[in-house]
Amino acid sequence: MADRIAILGGGTGGTVLANTLAERLAPEIDAGDVEVTLINDDPDHVYKPVWLYVPFGQREPADGRRPLRDLVDGRIDLAIDRVTEIDTDAKELALREGDDPLGYDHLVVATGSTLAADEIPGLAEAGHDYYSESGALELREELLSMTEGHLVVSVVGTPHMCPAAPLEFAFMADDWFRERGLRDDIEITYTYPINRVHGNPHIGEWAEPMMADRDINTETFFNAESVDPDAETITSMEGTELDYDLLAAIPPHRGVDVVEAADLGDRGWVDVDKHTLEAERADDVYALGDAATTGVPKAGSVAHYQAGVVAQRLESEVRGRPATATYDGKTLCFIETGTDAASFVEFDYENPPSPAPPSEKLHWSKLAYNEAYWLTARGLL
Amino acid sequence: MSDIDIEPTDTVDARGAACPGPLMDLIGRVRSASPGDVIVLLSDNDQSLTDVSEWVDETDNELLAIDESGDDYGFYVEVP
């Protein structure tokens, strides 16, 4: 009987993993000894970093979508379906459309993040975000109609996707309004839950003086408790109330319900060994990317590197060898510091980030990578 | 051995989490707490010593005690 590998989720992590396995295990797959199934409930693969540019009119959501079938190697069984139950004892996945459960010998959970704005009263009604296609489009309309007033960029929940994106948005908004001659009439305030402007102290220390130089107000230790859409105020647990005219918020994030129901971790995330990426609460289960609680950012680069590790480990397991590949926490991020400059950080579990001086070259490197990403999804870059 | 004699309502185990994970885990639990609840945050991250104390100072919550007797820290926080 074939060794069955099921990958749950066709985002960056799941797609890179599928394509890497297709290459590494090609002889076994061709011989019928290994079957790899990628399950995703959307026929499209979505590259979320595109959304940052949508509110400023620089990209469209369609730029971040391509059919999974065009990206995934033909050796992979692609199932466009939704998993409704994970049974880690029976090693089966129940599918919404499928009549029979899908059995597996190895499961990889790559289910990503979901938004949970409803956890904060008033936020879903009043807040705008660029962490979804619809949110980014609505925010674009709001920004285009804003000619004066107070823009509040509020990080409501952490962990959240792409930890640098709130800083990027604030810097880009500052530049965008300056270029349009409106900045003198628009106040920008950035809020963050802890006592600095970013979770990583090195990035926080780097960003804070730049925000001060550009007259971006900061409110730290600001954990949003509620939003009043009528009064247009956002209030923190710490007792601070801010008036806003436009609220761009990063909502609380969760994993997915089916993972939470399987008791693989809390809030839909999977508790894992941060080096092997093996689930701690079930056998023969890995998790990667946003779904895995490794403590590193929920970022595409993380999912990409972790996919390589899991692919190597699964290859070893299928071939009856000890799995030795481990994840070292490697993370890589470009950070936009405006509309024509960016920085870059690279770090891991042992080595902290040291942001590069912002430059136009790094900005174009980021935009170029966003195009080259489609090679990453194919497992080629 | 700890001589702290406080019976917590709930425990948040953030051992192994990188900064600011422990503080954010605590804040997440405080959000759903009832008045009078005492939450103990377990952390092995030294940064928590300043993060947790500074955050509690910003709020109406009270840091009842810090258990530093073992390998990990235990922060006892009472919600008003």
Image (cartoon, rainbow, N blue to C red):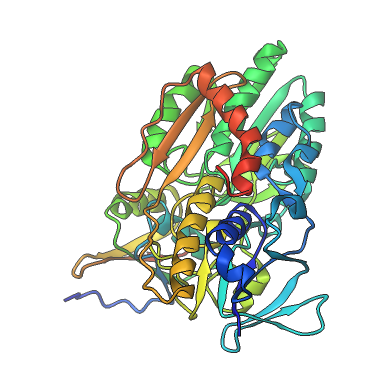
- Measured along the vertical axis of the image, is residue A315 above or below residue A370? below
Q: Is residue A101 visible?
A: yes
Counting from the top left corner in percent of width and height, residue A66 is at: 76, 46
Q: Is residue A293 visible?
A: no
Counting from the top left corner in percent of width and height, residue A179 is at: 68, 12
Taking the view exactly as shown, the residue that stands out farthest to the bottom is A90
Look at the image and tell me in which quarter the N terminus of chain A lies: bottom right
Taking the view exactly as shown, the residue that stands out farthest to the left is B1
Q: Residue visible at 76% across and 28% down? A: A143
The picture quadrant where one finds residue A110 is: bottom right
The picture quadrant where one finds residue A58 is: top right
- Measured along the vertical axis of the image, is residue A216 above or below residue A196? above
Counting from the top left corner in percent of width and height, residue A288 is at: 52, 61
Q: Residue visible at 49% across and 68% down? A: A314
Please tell me how many numbered marks the rendered image carries: 0
- Measured along the vertical axis of the image, is residue B20 above or below residue A180? below
Q: Residue visible at 63% across and 75% down? A: A32
- Measured along the vertical axis of the image, is residue B43 above or below residue A366? below
Counting from the top left corner in percent of width and height, residue A231 is at: 75, 41
Residue in front for this viewpoint, A248 or A311: A311
Residue in front for this viewpoint, A17 or A207: A17
Left or right? Give the position of A371 relative to A146.
Answer: left
Left or right? Give the position of B40 relative to A149.
Answer: left
Residue in front for this viewpoint, A40 or A26: A26
Residue in front for this viewpoint, A232 or A183: A183
Q: Residue visible at 43% across and 77% down? A: B9
Look at the image and tell me in which quarter the C terminus of chain A lies: top right
